[in-house]
Image (cartoon, rainbow, N blue to C red):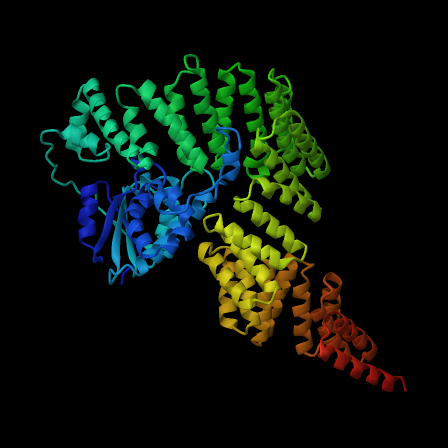
Amino acid sequence: MSGHHWICAPHHRERETLRAGLDLPPLLASLDAHRRLRGPYTAAGTLLRLVAPEALERRPELAARHYIELQESTPELAPLVPQITHHMEEQSSAGEVSRYPARLHSLRVAHGIVDFLLAALADDGAGGPRTLVVENVEHADVTDQEFLAAALRRIPPELLTLVLCSGTAELLDPPGFPSLSLPEALAAHAEQTRGAGSVLPPAPAGPGAARRYVDGDCLDDSPALIAAYEELPGAERAALHDRRAAELADRAEEGEASLRLGALPYHLMRGSDAAGAGVEALRAALLRCKYLGFYHMAAELGDEGRRFVDPAERPELWWVFIRESGVCLAAAGRPDESAVLQEEARTATLNPAHHMKLAYEIGMLYARHYPEERRDPRRARAWVNTAIALSDLLPDPKERAFYSVFNRNGLALVEVRDGRPDEALRLLDEGIERLGRELDLGERTWHRVGLRYNRSQVNSMSGRLEAALEDYAEILDADDDFADHYFNRGNILRKLGRAEEAIADYERALSLEAPFPEAYYNRGDARLELGDTEGALADFDRTLELDPGHQEALLARSGLFADLGEAEAAQADVDAGLALAPGHAHLLCLRGRLLAEAGRTKEAAEALEAALAGDPELAEAWAVKGELAYSEGDLPTAAADFDRAVELADRPEFRFNRAVVHEAAGRFDRAAADFDAVYAATGDPDASEHRDSCLSAAGRSAV
């Protein structure tokens, strides 16, 4: 069975010809990924509309397992799955949004879609593999690029052979910080077939060619159709777009909501009422994309709107487009582009409220959105101080209270980044008290919770773990359906040694969010603490299924394999981790341990030396080095190495091994002391027996 395929040719007809020459399984579907059609998840949504209704009927348990990714990627499926809840928004003032998703949320959704397809296609009765053809992948939204990249790696061709088709221009990652690279996935998992750009006989246009072109959402690359469209007078072209927009609007009203994020605003902006219905459709699509965390698409929609709307003629609409575009660019990992828009906005408006918001956003660029090496707390503080000064001048007392607190909340972030957590806590405490005093119950509920959330984060990172838990008790009273709250509280509980409660929180987090590797990894680590090696291994496997480059999961799983005596599997994970991070001290230490156990002492010593060069205070490396020295009969070096290991981390296993070295060297009193300490900490009968033997030997030596 061949693998996945990538077909590159300048024209659709040539790509079809090349595909016909491949030996492929029967066709499941041929679909178009161009974001003009339905915006985010155009390709994934089209596939899910095809396979999900029957799969959910056949396997109803998939609805509860995949409800988030199905309805966020494909709103048409919302009636078939449990609804996503946002209790805080339901209880707050009309129009309040409690939060916007993190940039990685769409990647989690992509993995959830892949999980669903793996389950839905595995037992659908097809009796063999099939083929999915995806056209125009170079024009896919970032969400579809993430989905296709995940699918190429995770869906075996024996189940579904992917044939991705694009033009011959270099396929590039989107701007910003891509979470998953489609070009890299294609290079790793697909065989490329490249066309020669041969000239095919032109397809005849025929009557109604321009209308066919518009009805195809202007995606057909036939020169005859394009020419027929371009030859029409402007008014006639607009009429065709009006007609197509009306059809799409009817379909959207009947349930195809995803059209509102793609083809519908596209045609309205080219119809006869672009300044009215067109820009309104753009505005609505932008805000919807921002709400769902589709930040690249939201920025693109905002850019089109801002270029169409004159700030002097329609200042409030212009403000929506330029401000939301800047915010979304920052959230998408494109801070430099965001800064350009912030500057453009500042030169075009005299509105004090606008300048207040822009000052805050520029401050956040310096505090959190720029890469680490470009962040600047001083500049961030200067801009946020400007926002605070302007907010304190707002005439409406409630608006003044809200924005004064909101901007000081931003200043608290700056203080944390500048190493001043106590000042951050003071600002947050004052904000919580002021909102409670000056706003009515139910007003700005999301921001009240946000302040407590930030306070819990500062308390946690400052070691005030019980105070952080108290914050979360209040947070979850108001906001009990947000995965991050449970994930973060689980981390706090683990630090307090309450592993079982932490596991319960991680499981709740996983039920409220599309699959994300961090929760599986942390749950696996907590399970390992409780001795549940089978559960821990399953969680580490799942972590690495979602993120093969998760270094800590590779380390944890390799260590677990080593403890279980599965040296080959352990070595494979160590090699994979070191390929990603050659200087990773813990992985080098484990390599040294595995090599030592295999009798390759010289290589083991080299690995341990490299580990300690990277982290001289890595206790495990000193302990393994001590074991290696002991095995070679070098007792003085072994004792010194174990002394260093115990000094860095006084663990029972290190003391036990040091005691063995002391015993072998005839230092029975020191050996007895170490064995006694081990027995006191663990109750290990071996330690007790060795202690008694050493005490007896010490007595004989004294005589």
- Figure quadrant of residue 408: top right
Instruction: State the quadrant of the N terminus.
Output: bottom left
Above or below, 471 relative to 118: above
Above or below, 33 relative to 494: above
- In the displayed structure image, the side of residue 179 where residue 606 appears, left or right: right
The answer to whether residue 441 is seen in the rendering is: yes
Image location of residue 162, percent across then percent down: 29, 53
- In the displayed structure image, the side of residue 684 where residue 278 appears, left or right: left
Q: How many marks?
A: 0
- In the displayed structure image, the side of residue 239 where residue 496 appears, left or right: right
Q: Residue at x 55, y 67 (%)?
A: 533
The answer to whether residue 6 is seen in the rendering is: no
Q: Residue at x 45, y 28 (%)?
A: 325
- Figure quadrant of residue 643: bottom right
Instruction: State the quadrant of the C terminus.
Output: bottom right
Q: Residue at x 21, y 56 (%)?
A: 26
- In the displayed structure image, the side of residue 411 where residue 650 appears, left or right: right
Q: Residue at x 49, y 30 (%)?
A: 327
Please name whichever residue, 47 or 138, is drawn nearer the observer in this view of the structure.
47
Above or below, 406 relative to 317: below
Please name whichever residue, 1 or 435, is drawn nearer the observer in this view of the structure.
435
Q: Residue furthest right?
A: 703
Image location of residue 588, percent across then percent down: 58, 63
Image location of residue 426, percent across then percent down: 72, 34
Image location of residue 166, percent across then percent down: 28, 43
